[in-house]
Image: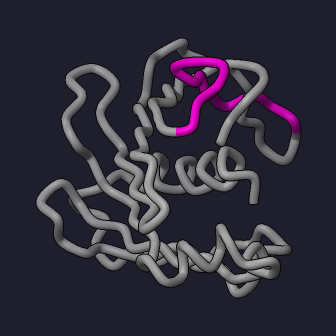
Amino acid sequence: MYEGNDTFPFVNSEGTELCTVEASSNWDVAGDYLLTDSQAGKELVVLDNDISLLQDTWRIRDAEDESLIAEINSRGAPFTVARKLLPVGQWLGHRFEITDADGTAIGTIESETAVLDQYEITISDSSSVPIDPIVTATVVIDAIQGN
């Protein structure tokens, strides 16, 4: 869940703003988040999410024509429910599967524990999906979900 400012910056390790993330509303449980290139002012991609206790599903869409670029899905109901409802659930590591627009599995996003915010992103086929939006989406999803 994202609450508070409706826009926040995405900066690199030197503090340079790379892009901004703008929520579709100030109180957003499931909705759209627009990523805009801070240097060029160009809208890059839209992240959208459906609310569900059973599985987190994030879609990365082209900002211009809203076509699906990729989808990021959590590992399924038992882990998603455990992460959200168990007292120690927030300590469980994340695992997401990345699929391209055709639904073909092309990679994973994983963390061993949810404490360190360190993810390993593995992409087996980058020919159908641009890498930068996947990496940015991973960080934004982590921030939005308060991990």
Q: Where is residue 102 in the image (x, y as percent from the top left)?
A: 12, 60
Asked whether residue 19 is drawn in magenta, I would say: yes
Give left or right: position of 101 versus 75.
left
Q: Position of residue 147 (x, y in %)?
A: 75, 60
In the rendered view, would you say 26 is above or below 119?
above
- Tell me how many marks there are: 0
Q: Position of residue 14 (x, y in %)?
A: 87, 41
Give left or right: position of 134 versus 87.
left
- For the magenta stretch, what is the residue range? 15-29
Please give the name of the residue rendered at 37% of the width and 75% of the height, measured from the top-left corner.
107
In the rendered view, would you say 111 is above or below 37?
below
Please give the name of the residue rendered at 23% of the width and 60% of the height, measured from the top-left corner.
100
Please give the name of the residue rendered at 78% of the width and 24% of the height, measured from the top-left corner.
4
Asked whether residue 100 is drawn in magenta, I would say: no
The residue nearer to you, when weighing 89 against 67, is: 89
Q: Which colour scheme is used?
A: one colour
In the rendered view, would you say 110 is above or below 48?
below
In the rendered view, would you say 71 is above or below 37?
below
The residue nearer to you, when weighing 86 against 69, is: 86
The residue nearer to you, when weighing 142 against 42, is: 142
Please give the name of the residue rendered at 54% of the width and 73% of the height, measured from the top-left corner.
80
Quarter of the image where one finds residue 113: bottom right
Q: Position of residue 62 (x, y in %)?
A: 29, 32
